[in-house]
Image: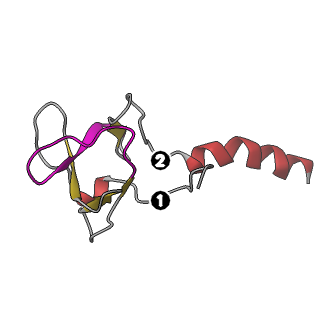
Amino acid sequence: MRMFLCLMFVAAPVLAWDGEDAYGPGTHADRYGRPFQFQTDDGQAVPGAVHVQPNGYGLGVGMDEYGRPVQATDPQTGQRLDALSIDDDETPDEDE
């Protein structure tokens, strides 16, 4: 039993990691560790303080807290990321 508890304490942070703000405010990590930012349809970057629900409008189209559709974009090239490379396993915020 003691070994099981020790393994759970080690594995729990790994399972809960979602890459949010991994490279600074507004710059997240996809499931492969690559940086990305959420952008609106008109190319406006979503600030780091704005919560985004991945796949809120369907596969690959997230929803920010203002209801705008957003997509994951490579910050250097501006290309859209593959929808399946973004984790949608959200862990609830402590303040919610």
Q: Tell me the quadrant of the picture where the C terminus can be found.
A: bottom right
Which sits in the foreground, 54 or 67? 67
Badge 1: few (under 14), some or many (20 or more) residues near its Cα, within 10 Å? few
Spatial CA distance of label 1 from label 2 is 7 Å
Find residue 60 and report its horizontal and vertical position in percent: 24, 62
Residue at figure coordinates x 39%, y 55% from the top left = 87
Residue placed furthest toward the right: 1
- Determine whether 45 is above or below 15 in the image: above
Sooner in the amino-acid sequence: mark 1 or mark 2: 2
Give the dominant element type of the magenta stretch: helix, strand or loop.
loop
Colouring mode (rainbow / by chain / secondary structure / one colour) = secondary structure
Q: Does the magenta stretch include residue 48?
A: yes
Kindly check if marks 1 and 2 are in contact, taking CB atoms under 8 A apart as contact.
yes
**Span highlighted in magenta in the image:** 33-51
Residue at figure coordinates x 41%, y 36% from the top left = 21
Tag 2 residue: 18
Q: What residue type is labelled 1?
A: Asp
Tag 1 residue: 89
Q: In this view, does 24 lie to the left or right of 38?
A: right
Within the image, what quadrant is residue 88 found in? bottom left
